[in-house]
Image: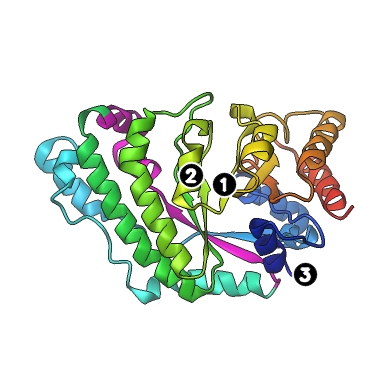
Amino acid sequence: MTGTERVRDTILGKPTDRQPIYGWVSANLSNEITAACGSVAAFEDRYEFDAAHIFGGPGPYRGDVFERIKAENGELTPDLLVNEDFFTDPDVLTDYQGIKDTVAFHKARGRFCYMQTPGFFEAFNGVFGIENQLLYVAMYPDELAELYRRQAEWTVRFADHCRDCGVDMIHVSDDWGAQNNLMFNPNFWWEAIFPNLKKVADHVHSLGLFCSLHSDGCVAKVTDGIVKAGINLVHPWQESAGMGLDYYIDNYSDKFAIMGGICVQTAIGLLPQDKLESEIRRVFSLLRGRRWVCCTSHFVQNHCTMEDLFFAFDLIYRLARE
């Protein structure tokens, strides 16, 4: 099987020849990996990664509009944005050439390609700052819902062009969880986020693609909504935030796949190698053969040594083939 076939069938709950593997390794360790392997691509080839996480394309916002509004008003709040045209044009085809080239590179290696796109709450954290936006959830819930609606419209058009570039899945990145709970009231999620997430997922499915979600932290209170929205895969399903693997297996393994299992918060780069091995073996014992893409829970942090990184992925490589 190719990586594309292996990940696709894993998401669908079909049998595969082995467990698919991937890892978010590049953001903090690119220099170290390049020094050790020649390039991040060489590291990915060494471990025969089955997937590729694609970034790029047009950004959604016009920063010049934000700067003008702040200059005119001394602040930037949702009520000041609702009547502004601050989204970029997602239909400029030259903006997608980098995505097309990157997908071609990974497809030559047989990999399943998933394209990151900003979600709703997380995307506007970049506009307002997370502390401000949490305040605005209480002050401007209707205005935020309108901004999220427009974000969804932009994402739908973005997804059209990503499909044309050859991607297999649209990956909505939208952090909602704190360590033990959502960062906001679940009612706000259902009213402002859910309808827009579902709109994006429905459109992505109409294109013949999968739709996945990245959300750190504990999202247990809205997991039924994630199912209802039609999400095919969730990353990371974070055990260290109270999202137990047994709970997933018992309640949601027939509804969506998960990607993750190798925790950057409690395991890789933190545990001594004997305990790291035990932890990785534990995760495999629970998830092997299920709708699971073995992956890190987020980008491996720069306190992880190359010795530990190689140790972890040597073990993952072997276990995936047992």
Rendered location of residue 26, percent (x, y) = 63, 51
Rendered location of residue 269, percent (x, y) = 72, 34
Q: Does the residue at mark 2 contact the one at mark 1 (Cβ under 8 Å)? A: yes
Q: Which quadrant of the figure has residue 1?
A: bottom right
- Dot placed on the residue nearer the N-terminal end, 1 or 3: 3
**Circle 3: element type:** loop
Residue under numbered circle 3 = 1
Q: Is residue 211 left or right of residue 86?
A: right
Q: Amino acid at mark 3?
A: Met
Q: Which quadrant of the figure has residue 167?
A: bottom right
Residue 208 visible in the shown view: yes
Q: Does the residue at mark 3 contact the one at mark 2 (Cβ under 8 Å)? A: no
Q: Residue furthest right?
A: 322
Q: Which portion, as a residue range, is magenta?
A: 109-137
Q: Residue furthest top?
A: 180
**Circle 1: element type:** strand
Mark-to-mark CA distance, 1 and 3: 23 Å
- Dot placed on the residue nearer the N-terminal end, 2 or 1: 2
Residue under numbered circle 2 = 226
Residue at left 79%, top 60%? 46
Residue at left 68%, top 61%? 7
| Front of the two marks 2 and 1 | 2
